[in-house]
Image (cartoon, helix red, strand yellow):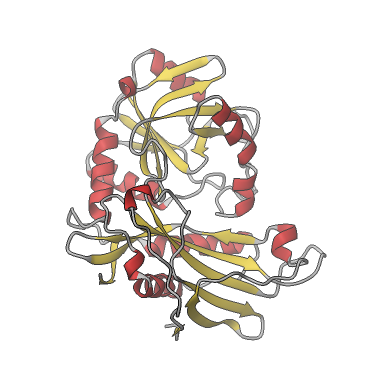
Amino acid sequence: MLDIKITRTTAPKAKPADESKLGFGKKFSDHMFLMDYDRQNGWHDPRVVPYANFTLDPACVVFHYAQEIFEGLKAYRTADNKIQLFRPECNGARMQDSCDRLCMPRIPVEDFVQACKTLVEVDKDWVPHTDGASLYLRPFIIATDVGLGVHASPTYTFCIIASPSGAYYAEGINPVRIYVEDEYIRAAPGLTGFAKCGGNYAASIKAGEMAEELGYAQVLWLDGVERKYVEEVGSMNIFFKIDGKVYTAACVGTVLPGVTRRSCIELCKDWGYEVVEGKLAIADIMKASKEGKLEEVFGTGTAAVISPVKELKWENEVAHISDGKIGPLTQKLYDTMTGIQWGKIADTKGWIVPVCNG
């Protein structure tokens, strides 16, 4: 267990007056968690301190060779004013996998969870009271060694910041339009597609901006080898309900193993759906649409939770889904996931980790 030192701010910020206008990742709480690493001491000096700027040398490895990783999870306030996390150990385990791929030192999962819980408890007044809003946590690790040679840094900083946030998408739970990208790719076998590292997201911005110019909310990526099999959306994993079965790309190195994805698969199986994790060609999805068999499409992710899709555009073809409305499975998943997260539905899966009373 970490011995976390807590230094509270002497100048607390004004909290958002209107929680209906929080947006996503725009405002930040009073404190942050920090922990340092070097080869002699390992991970050491865990602390919660007032939120403040970093001071880093311009030659830091993180700036030049992108040796950094991050996570995303949320703290929720229930109706009876209890604050809780949703499966934080899954985020901690995924961060370890990202560490391995980026040659960074692992943080024990129990330490990761303790750090998240401690920051949330210190900043519990920042957890929104409004239904659907939450305190988004952004844990990240950056390389801090100074030098321009390409190398794994011997020193790192682990930080967690917190942001009171509303719905991720401007459309909220309303169905979104997705553009299928077949020129640029997000990942390829042997690269970093399964890791949550900034470079993956930076490389996606170009296609995302092009899709936005065409009026689409997100990009659906195809595989990087044949460019025919669906993989994931910019900020979400994605599912297709075709003729009663649920399909999603397998996590075989090019797809981020989402915590919400994993949870939705478990729920679908509990409800009797056959879930197929494997290759699904975009051509077959469009064919299913023409035949009236493409029943629902939805994205999953920590930020958006569940995001229904009403339209897919690929080349010169457009698939219209569920008459532009939220499908019944999509709605059930959304209601169940958010119900568990906000304490409206009993947690029979053991997914909730209590933090403190509000």
Q: Residue furthest right?
A: 149
Return the x and y of residue 152 as percentages of the image width and height: 72, 67
Question: Can you say whether 243 is above or below 338 in the image?
Answer: above
Kindly identify the residue that appears in the image at 50 percent across and 81 percent down.
46
Of 17 and 259, nearer the camera is 17
Is 24 on the left-hand or right-hand side of 254?
Answer: left
Residue 273: in sight, yes or no? no
* Callout count: 0
Question: Can you say whether 109 is above or below 17 in the image?
Answer: below
Return the x and y of residue 179 as percentages of the image width and height: 52, 27
Is 246 on the left-hand or right-hand side of 42?
Answer: left
Residue 252: in sight, yes or no? yes
Of 193 and 235, nearer the camera is 235
Kindly identify the residue that appears in the image at 73 percent across and 65 percent down.
61
The image quadrant where one finds the C terminus is: bottom left
Of 178 and 269, nearer the camera is 178
Task: Classify residue 174 by image quadrant.
Answer: top left
Task: Classify residue 238 by image quadrant.
Answer: top left
Question: Can you say whether 264 is above or below 161 in the image?
Answer: above
Is 150 on the left-hand or right-hand side of 346?
Answer: right
Kindly identify the residue that appears in the image at 49 percent across and 67 percent down.
160
Kindly identify the residue that appears in the image at 67 percent across and 61 percent down.
67
Return the x and y of residue 327 as percentages of the image width and height: 28, 29
The image quadrant where one finds the N terminus is: bottom left
Return the x and y of residue 325 as percentages of the image width and height: 30, 26
